[in-house]
Image (cartoon, helix red, strand yellow):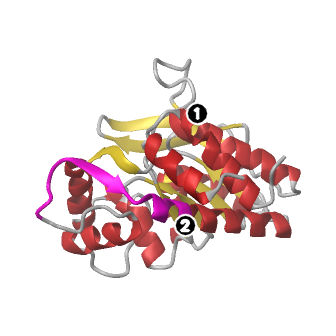
């Protein structure tokens, strides 16, 4: 198992934490849109309280370690690796508890090009521990509003992890699936599971709308989020999301492998 000091150094060296690629401008734009309750950035969370942009800056400073100064309006965001490590520990503890109970689980990602491998290894380990890895609504169509208008995607599972793909042969850059923030895929999957008479997941693992959409519906949800995804951290602050790990969700897919090993070791799920 990686020591805390080695993991911390790795997170910074790989730019998963520390100085990350996400810009302050992009994050502030997301906070403004969330404060205006734009569904493009709320991704399934319906906040109980009013979140103004200064509130969101304070929340993200607390949960991620970004600058708390509203006068900081440019440059790159910074994620505190200590916060990432603490959240990874909490994430692993939830996985371990699910494995101990042999809970049915659902995994899904809106970042299949980057994070599919991370979740797929977790799915394999949970399955080996006796958990049922659910795959409801396989092949079902989901209509998602994008900046290009309404688009139809197919809900599919790769190595036990849900994702969406455009119909037809994969296009350039979409070999693993499409990038999506929408909560509609998880709502479709959960509705299909309920229609089939269950089982329903006792834990949903993922990112973007998979976490927010499930958490809003009352399912325990844990996941990963970048500094420009305030919805997950609002969900965590309001008690609808159990754990959010702050990290850059856009680095090379193989860079997440040491995190996978760390989580599995802590959860006693190493194979």
Residue nearer the viewer, 67 or 153:
67
- Of mark 1 and mark 2, the one earlier in the sequence is 2
**In the image as oriented, which residue stretches furthest toward the front?**
5
Residue 51 appears at what percent x and percent y? 27, 75
Mark yes or no: residue 45 visible: no
Could you tell whether 137 is left or right of 68 in the image?
Answer: right
Quarter assignment of residue 164: top right
SS class of the residue under badge 1? helix
Q: Residue at x 37, y 81 (%)?
A: 48
x and y percentages locating residue 130 in the rendered image: 88, 57
As drawn, the label of residue 166 is none
Numbered tag placed on residue 86 in the rendering: 2
Question: Left or right: 10 with respect to 77?
Answer: right
Membership of 78 in magenta stretch = yes
The residue at the far bottom in this view is: 49
Q: Report helix, strand or loop for mark 2.
A: helix
Left or right of 66, for residue 253: right
Q: Position of residue 243 (x, y in %)?
A: 55, 68
Task: Decide if residue 220 is on the left or right side of residue 95.
Answer: left
Residue named by callout 1? 254
Does residue 127 show up?
yes
| Residue in the picture at 58% in, 51% down | 6
Q: Nearer the viewer, residue 33 or 269?
A: 269
- The correct choice, above or below, for 46 with respect to 147 in the image is below
Residue found at x 49% / y 60%: 84
Is 14 one of the magenta-colored residues?
no
* Residue 254 drawn above or below residue 121: above
The magenta stretch spans which residues? 71-86
- Seen at 58% across and 61% down, the residue is 88
Q: Is residue 158 above or below residue 33?
A: above
Q: Position of residue 112 (x, y in %)?
A: 55, 37
Give the spatial CA distance, label 1 vs label 2: 22 Å
């Amino acid at each position: 198992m990686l020591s805390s000091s080695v993991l911390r150094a790795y997170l910074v060296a790989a730019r998963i934490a520390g100085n990350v690629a996400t810009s302050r401008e992009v994050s502030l734009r997301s906070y403004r849109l969330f404060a205006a309750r734009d569904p493009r950035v709320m991704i399934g969370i319906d906040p109980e309280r009013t979140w103004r942009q200064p509130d969101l800056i304070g929340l993200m400073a607390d949960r991620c370690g970004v600058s708390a100064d509203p006068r900081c309006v440019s440059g790159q965001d910074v994620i505190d690796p200590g916060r990432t490590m603490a959240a990874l520990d909490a994430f692993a503890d939830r996985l371990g508890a699910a494995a101990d109970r042999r809970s049915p689980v659902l995994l899904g990602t809106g970042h299949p090009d980057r994070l599919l491998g991370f979740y797929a290894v977790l799915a394999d380990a949970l399955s080996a521990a006796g958990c049922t890895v659910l795959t409801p609504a396989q092949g079902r169509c989901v209509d998602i509003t994008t900046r290009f208008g309404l688009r139809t995607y197919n809900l599919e599972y790769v190595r036990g992890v849900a994702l969406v793909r455009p119909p037809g042969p994969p296009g350039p850059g979409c070999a693993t699936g499409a990038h999506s923030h929408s909560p509609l895929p998880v709502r479709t999957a959960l509705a299909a599971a309920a229609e089939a008479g269950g089982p329903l997941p006792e834990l949903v693992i993922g990112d973007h709308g998979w976490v927010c959409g499930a958490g809003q519906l009352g399912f325990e949800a844990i996941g990963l989020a970048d500094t420009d995804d305030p919805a997950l951290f609002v969900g965590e602050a309001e008690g609808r999301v159990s754990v959010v790990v702050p990290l850059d969700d856009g680095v090379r897919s193989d860079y997440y492998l040491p995190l996978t090993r760390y989580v599995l070791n802590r959860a006693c799920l190493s194979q």
